[in-house]
């Protein structure tokens, strides 16, 4: 297990379409997932997608009890999600601030579906699904966007609500975002 380098916006690998995971339960997959959790925790992240560490697979991890970068967010269960499919439960959207480990030091207001159903596989190939709302739904959408080569600034509608975290939120210990 080790902490991997996180690719930053501008790296062309972040713009690729990720490939589906075809082999589950392998030692290589287990090691990748362990590295992803180590990397996410070391950066105080809410989630991490495999493409963010240069691995072009449809694999995201997310979850936390509490997070200094999102102090008002409800806990999200620790989840390993492979080959995800997201379906909105309605057309209702919510706007809220987002940051990204691949876009350090910046935040922006991003519209996301308020609630959604997601399905996919765990690391052993067992299918599972959930219906989620609020911040949990936002985190899943943000991480799965990485699998389609989308970074959150691409979703911002109003660039007057995009900027450096230390300017937008003075005194907030937001880490490296």
Image: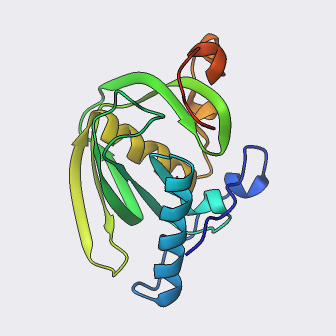
Q: Nearer the viewer, residue 77 or 81?
A: 77
Residue positioned 33% across, 32% down in the render: 73
Residue positioned 55% across, 30% down in the render: 174
| Place of residue 171 in the rendered image (x, y in percent of width and height, measured from the top left) | 56, 17
Name the quadrant containing residue 115: top left
Q: Relative to 59, is 161 on the left or the right?
A: right
Residue positioned 33% across, 65% down in the render: 120
Number of marks in the image?
A: 0
Q: Is residue 137 above or below residue 164?
A: below
Question: Does any portion of residue 172 appear in the rendered image?
Answer: yes
Q: Relative to 160, is 41 on the left or the right?
A: left
- Classify the position of the N terminus by image quarter: bottom right
Question: Does any portion of residue 17 appear in the rendered image?
Answer: no
- Classify the position of the C terminus by image quarter: top right
The type of colouring in the image is: rainbow
| Place of residue 56 in the rendered image (x, y in percent of width and height, measured from the top left) | 62, 67
Name the quadrant containing residue 135: top left
Q: Nearer the viewer, residue 32 or 39?
A: 39
| Place of residue 140 in the rendered image (x, y in percent of width and height, measured from the top left) | 39, 47
Q: Is residue 110 above or below residue 9?
A: above
Q: Residue furthest top?
A: 160
Residue positioned 30% across, 31% down in the render: 114
Name the quadrant containing residue 165: top right
Q: Is residue 18 above or below residue 91?
A: below
Q: Nearer the viewer, residue 150 or 98?
A: 98
């Amino acid at each position: 297990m080790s902490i991997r380098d996180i690719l930053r916006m501008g790296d062309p690998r972040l713009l690729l379409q990720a490939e589906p995971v075809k082999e589950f339960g392998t030692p290589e997959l287990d090691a990748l997932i362990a590295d992803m959790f180590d990397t996410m925790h070391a950066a105080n992240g809410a989630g991490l997608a495999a493409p963010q560490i240069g691995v072009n697979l449809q694999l995201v991890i997310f979850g936390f009890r509490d997070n200094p970068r999102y102090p008002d967010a409800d806990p999200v269960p620790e989840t390993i999600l492979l080959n995800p499919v997201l379906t909105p439960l309605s057309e209702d959207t919510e706007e809220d601030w987002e940051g990204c480990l691949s876009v350090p030091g910046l935040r922006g207001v991003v519209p996301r579906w308020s609630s959604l159903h997601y399905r996919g596989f765990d690391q052993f190939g067992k299918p599972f699904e959930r219906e989620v709302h609020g911040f949990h739904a936002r985190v899943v959408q943000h991480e799965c966007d990485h699998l389609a080569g989308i970074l959150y600034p691409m979703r911002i509608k109003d660039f007057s609500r995009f900027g450096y975290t230390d300017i937008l939120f003075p005194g907030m210990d937001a880490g490296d975002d």
